Image: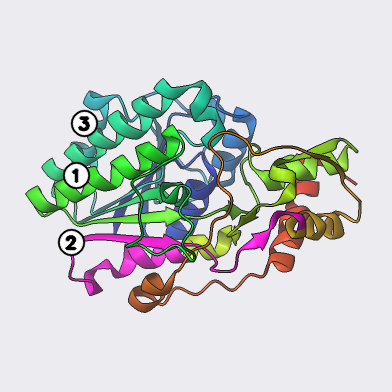
Amino acid sequence: MKILVTGTAGFIGYHVAKRLLELGNEVVGLDNINDYYDVRLKYGRLAETGIAEDEIVYGKLTQSNKYPEYRFIKLNLEDRENLQNLFAEKKFDIVCNLAAQAGVRYSIENPYAYIDSNIIGFMNILECCRHNSIKHLVYASSSSVYGQNATVPFTEDGIVDKPVSLYAATKKANELMAYTYSHLYHLHTTGLRFFTVYGHWGRPDMAPMLFAKAITKSDAIMVFNQGDLSRDFTYIDDIVEGVVKVIEKQSDVETIYKIYNIGCSQPVKLMDFIHTLENALDKKAKLIMMPMQAGDVFQTYADTAKLETDFGYKPKVTLKEGMEKFVKWYKMYNKVC
């Protein structure tokens, strides 16, 4: 298949593109490589797939020196003209849209970045899919759409009309926009509500990287809500296998509009997560207990029964195994002894 994967300088996008290439697909990766966090990490991910930083030119396809069937383009999703030209030229079969302005807390400080990327950018993706006979659009939604929903585990038919952050609101808007295009134009769309993803090449603004850095440097960790939080942590390898199953086997599902939770279905208390990381690093953390932050939620807990039934999705990596893998990579990447 010929697949466009957006967000391939990002955490999940990088891993998905790499896996699709290993399976023999032709892939075009797209990312705007913004500076939301250290771009060296983004260029490092690209380098792992054979895309050299000094060969990247905005709006131009760069050939991978590692995968013959991989090309990358630096492009903003808001750049409607260049995006339309890319679709017309490459004639994709499948689009996997993982590009977005991420981060719950950042959305409180920089709201326009979320409207530009997550609303306008997603609208452009939908229009390009509509006009270029795309067989299937798979896109990233988020567990944040569940807001302060107290009914757990979260199911796909649960209440999602009370987001507590602009980021969550944009992800819910994506689902509504996709539904409209599925209804009006018979575009096959599948939204994946990602729960907390961690692992090698992860984002530095998320807990595993933040905590690992602090513990390694003997700095204190800010623990919000006095540590009384829980998250459905899922290792990246499990997430990637789930995404790839959806991309490859969508023809088995008749409904043209679908939403799935994709997580581990085993929420972990934040303090247990910290203790597991301490064990993997063999070093104790210094903790500063803090109140709840605006835009945060008390817990996330995925019911993944639908994804398991339709696609055979079943996470395999335990928290202990995942944390050990993550720490091994973290030490190598940061040259920590």
Q: Position of residue 281 (x, y in %)?
A: 86, 54
Cα gap from disc 2 to disc 1, whole angstroms: 14 Å
**Dot 2 and dot 3 residues touching (CB under 8 Å):** no
Where disc 2 sits, the SS reads: loop
Tell which tag, 1 or 3, sits nearer the viewer: 1
Q: Report the amino acid beneath label 2.
A: Ile
Q: Position of residue 122 (x, y in %)?
A: 29, 37
Determine if residue 42 is in view.
yes
Find residue 278 and report its image quarter. bottom right
Q: Report the amino acid beneath label 3.
A: Asn
Residue that badge 3 annotates = 85
Horizontal arrangement in the rendering, residue 91 relative to residue 272 (left or right): left
Residue that badge 1 annotates = 129
| As drawn, 308 above or below 216 | below
Q: Which residues are magenta?
A: 242-271
Q: Report the amino acid beneath label 1.
A: Cys
Instruction: Name the N-terminal-most of marks 2 and 3.
Output: 3
Tell which tag, 2 or 1, sits nearer the viewer: 2
Residue that badge 2 annotates = 256
Where disc 3 sits, the SS reads: helix
Instruction: Name the N-terminal-most of marks 2 and 1.
Output: 1
| As drawn, 237 above or below 334 | below
For the point 15% across and 47% down, the residue is 181
For the point 42% across and 33% down, the residue is 166
Cα gap from disc 2 to disc 3, whole angstroms: 26 Å
